Each structure stands twice: as C-alpha cells, then as structure tokens.
Image (cartoon, rainbow, N blue to C red):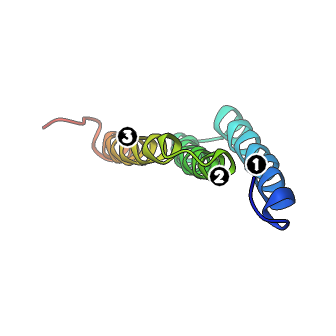
Amino acid sequence: MNGPILSWALPAALFLLGVAMACCLVRMVKGPSAQDRVLALDCMYLNGMLLMLVLGIYYGSSNYFEASLLIALLGFASSTAMAKFLLRGEVIE
C-alpha cells in the first residue's frame, strides 16, 4: 500500500466522491430545467473520472488512469452535444 497519509486519505476521498456523485444524481433526477440536468450530468462524469483516478492511485494500476481518460473524452463530447441540442434543437446541422 501507500504511505501513512494515503492509507486514510484515499478511502476518505473515495467516500466523498461517492457522496458528490449521489448529490449530482439527485439534482439530475430532480432538476427543474434541462440545463440543470445537463450540468448535473457534467458534474457526475467529472466525479466519476476523479473516482477512477483515486482508484488508480489506491490499487497502483495504470488501467484506471486509461479508464478515466476515456470517461473524460466521452463526457466532454456528450456534454457538448447536449448543450448544442439545448441551444439549437439539433446536434448535427
């Protein structure tokens, strides 16, 4: 495992990122407008990416870092597409 500080900081970070994802899920389900739901989904993919990075540090595996990169790329593309759809009503012109 890692040093003495990381032995308690990594599980705490995992727990707090899980709580943040739960808060985003509540906002995504309950959000009064579509823009709130898109912002909550954007925040959720960022928290998921950070969760994968913390898991990569915790387990010492580079596979988690690659997964977090994929989450970041797909999340950015989907957030851009949803924002464009909400602005113009179509994604592909």
The disc placed on residue 54 is 2
In which quarter of the view is residue 18 placed?
Answer: top right
In which quarter of the view is residue 75 placed?
Answer: top left
- Asked if residue 1 lies left or right of residue 31, the reply is right
The disc placed on residue 39 is none
Q: Which residue is mark 3?
A: 74
CA gap between label 3 and label 2 equals 19 Å
Dot 2 crowding, Cα within 10 Å, few <14, some 14–19, many 20+ = many
Dot 1 crowding, Cα within 10 Å, few <14, some 14–19, many 20+ = some
Q: Secondary structure at mark 3?
A: helix
- Residue in the picture at 38% in, 42% down: 86
Dot 3 crowding, Cα within 10 Å, few <14, some 14–19, many 20+ = few
Q: Which residue is mark 1?
A: 14
Q: Callout 3, which amino acid?
A: Leu
Q: Quadrant of the C terminus?
A: top left
Give coordinates of residue 5: x percent, y percent: 83, 67
Please tell me which of labels 1 and 3 falls first in the chain.
1
- As displayed, is residue 78 above or below residue 39? above
